Amino acid sequence: MNRKPARGSRARSASGMVQALLCMMLSATPLLSAAQSPPLGADLPGLLEQARRANPEFGAMRLEADAAAQRIQPAGALPDPVLRVELENVNNYGNDARASLLPSKVGETKYTLMQSLPLWGKRALREQLAGADAEQARTRAAATWNELAMRVKAAYAQLYLAVERERLAKDVLDLMTRLERIAQARYAGGLVPQQDAIRAQVEQTAMRTELIALDNEKRQQRARLNALLAREMSAPLADPQALLPLPPAPALSAEALLQRARRANPALQGEAHRVESAQANRELTWRNRYPDISVGLSPTQMGSRITTWSVMVEMSIPLQQAARRAQEREAVAMVDAAQARAAAAAHQLAGELAGQLAGLEAARRTEALARTELLPQSELGFRSALAAYENGKADFATLLEAQRQIRRVRQDLLMAQAEARMRLAEIERTVGEDL
């Protein structure tokens, strides 16, 4: 008679610990690191800064953009002058002197200094063409960074999801250990079959199996992040401490984001500069109808003295009109193609942005529903099932299903949070700047 109350007391004590653990599991939220310089991996800004410094692909694109910028000034510069030296009558015919290659010992030496002069604004057009190409290189570097930043943000969110799911699985494992104690206490009192304790043990084994899979998922996500950061695959990374908050709903207006994307998206900027480059090339092709000229100054030396001076003008004659007209038609077609490509890119961007916003909105609604309705309902259902099991009004399967429901809701909540951040990363890549 005295043992039953003791077992019941132990069961109630274990039940109280289960409820306390459940409350901790439901209310626990990751805290931001209080350190001034969090370890690499603990927060997203640190990962992005490391990627900007170390990623070789982005570094190569920046160097290419720098190289393209250096082509602007030479494109508009004058060609190098040409110096020509002509030795006439080197065999000294009619003289008693022997043949020679020395300017003072031949019949006559003529020096010609020539300079080509592209006219009709061709130099300015070539400089404009090089500038547009340099801007295209810059936008390609910006697009590479946006893609890299999106991949880092997505990998960070997936690593956060794996870490939090592992934490949840450990909490559930601890919870199932305590539920097993309740089942064993009730079995010892002859109130429930031994199968209840065995099912609790089976559930613990399943949690340990899931922990192995989640640890593997963490390793894979860390390897992906290290690859993006140009680090060794096994280099250590701290666990993510928190996800960055989502922008307020007004900042995610489709029309406002589309306007920002048209202004800041590197792909659209690149297409605009491609159009500018094609237009400059078309203008340059048209101006090739007009001839280029070269001017020269020629002093003539006889013996050791300069005796005469000459001035020369050289002009190209644009006779190949058929070839030139074909080049002009090609340039016009390239302008039309560039404009069509820019329009297609704008339409594609609008479609991608609409889809990404829909995905983000769905993730936000799922998170809100899980947090405000499903989680409280699941918690209430578990408490009810636990009380009913303790009073012999429900079997262990009902209690186990209530626990599984809470776990599913918590997982759905975490997955919705990670999904929202990944969709946000895609939106920021499409817009071309952080929100």
Image: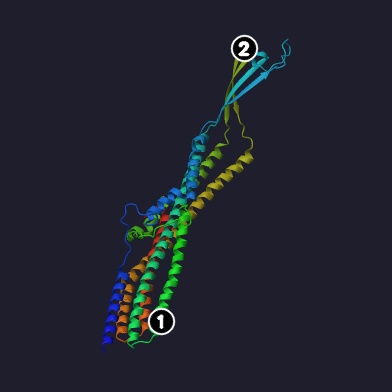
Q: Is residue 121 visible?
A: no
Judged left or right of residue 334, residue 385 is left
Taking the spot 29% from the left edge, 80% from the top edge, the residue there is: 10
Q: Is residue 96 above or below residue 40?
A: above
Precedes in sequence: disc 2 or disc 1:
1
Front-most of residues 391 and 198: 198
Callout in the foreground (2, 1):
1
Circle 1 residue = 198
Q: Is residue 300 visible?
A: yes
Q: Residue furthest front?
A: 2
Q: Nearer the viewer, residue 43 or 409?
A: 43
Residue shown at the point (44%, 67%) measured from the top left: 214
Front residue of this view, candidates 320 and 22:
22
What amino acid type is highlighted by mark number 2?
A: Ser
Q: Amino acid at mark 1?
A: Ile
Q: Quadrant of the N terminus?
A: bottom left
Q: CA distance from mark 2 to mark 1?
A: 116 Å
The percent coordinates of residue 61 (x first, y second) are 49, 47
Residue at the spot of label 2: 304
Question: Viewed as shown, does residue 379 lie left or right of 234?
Answer: left
Does the residue at mark 2 contact the one at mark 1 (Cβ under 8 Å)?
no
Kind of element beneath mark 2:
loop
Give residue 170's position: percent from left, percent from top.
Answer: 38, 70
Binning the other alpha carbons within 10 Å of mark 1 as few (below 14), some (14 to 19) or many (20 upward) gives some
Question: In the rendered image, which quarter is residue 391 located in?
Answer: bottom left
Residue 316 coordinates in the image, percent (x, y): 61, 31
| Image: 149 above or below 125 | below
Q: Position of residue 396 (x, y in %)?
A: 36, 83
Identify the residue at horizontal 45%, vertical 61% (top origin).
221
